[in-house]
Image: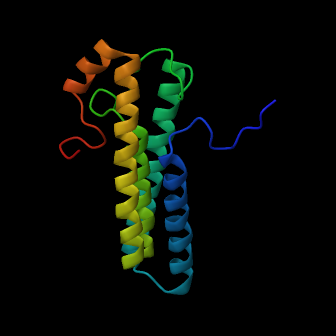
Amino acid sequence: MKPTLFFSGIAPLWPVKLLLSLILIVGACLHVFQRELPMARILTANMLILTGAFLELWHYRILKRGAGALGAPAQLVTRGGFLRVIRHPMYSGDVVMLFGFALLMSHPVGWGVFALFVGVVLGLCAQEDQAMAKQFPEPFAEWRKHTWRVFPGIV
């Protein structure tokens, strides 16, 4: 029996996404404890973090229920939540959540890591779009015509 790695079978950008997320989260925690931030920034950041987490968990539930498995879906899920408008609402949640952590960190390094994170997420979206187009050619092509990748009106 051949041993498998933890990250085998997933997109190569996933470990990068995870690492960048951890850097932002740890950096934000360190910065919050090292200096006093304005209450408005803390409240805004926390609202972004909670909103992003809610978006991710809500759409995880929708996709898991509709497709069976996220890595190898049995069918293309195009309804429920924000799926009528965007193709990757879980990544939208990630971006909103990590924007909150970058806001808490409030440091040029944090904003740079956040920008890299957004680039990695867009790369993951492109990879997943290709996989869905291959697995569900006609339904995906139709869905793609009417949806944005991550944020309506932006990307």
Farthest residue, direction right = 1
Q: Is residue 78 visible?
A: no
Residue at image x 51%, y 80%?
31
13 relative to 100, above or below: above
Give the camera-side residue of 41 and 138: 138
Residue at image x 53%, y 23%?
72
| For residue 138, side relative to residue 28 (left or right) | left
Across and down, in percent, residue 18 comes to 54, 54
Q: Is residue 46 visible?
A: yes
> Which quadrant of the view contains residue 86?
top left
> Which quadrant of the view contains residue 80?
top left
Residue at image x 31%, y 42%?
150
| For residue 134, side relative to residue 29 (left or right) | left
> Which quadrant of the view contains residue 153?
top left
Across and down, in percent, residue 14 comes to 51, 47
Across and down, in percent, residue 127 comes to 39, 36
The image quadrant where one finds the N terminus is top right
| For residue 31, side relative to residue 84 (left or right) | right
Give the camera-side residue of 116 and 35: 116
The image quadrant where one finds the C terminus is top left
Residue at image x 52%, y 73%?
27
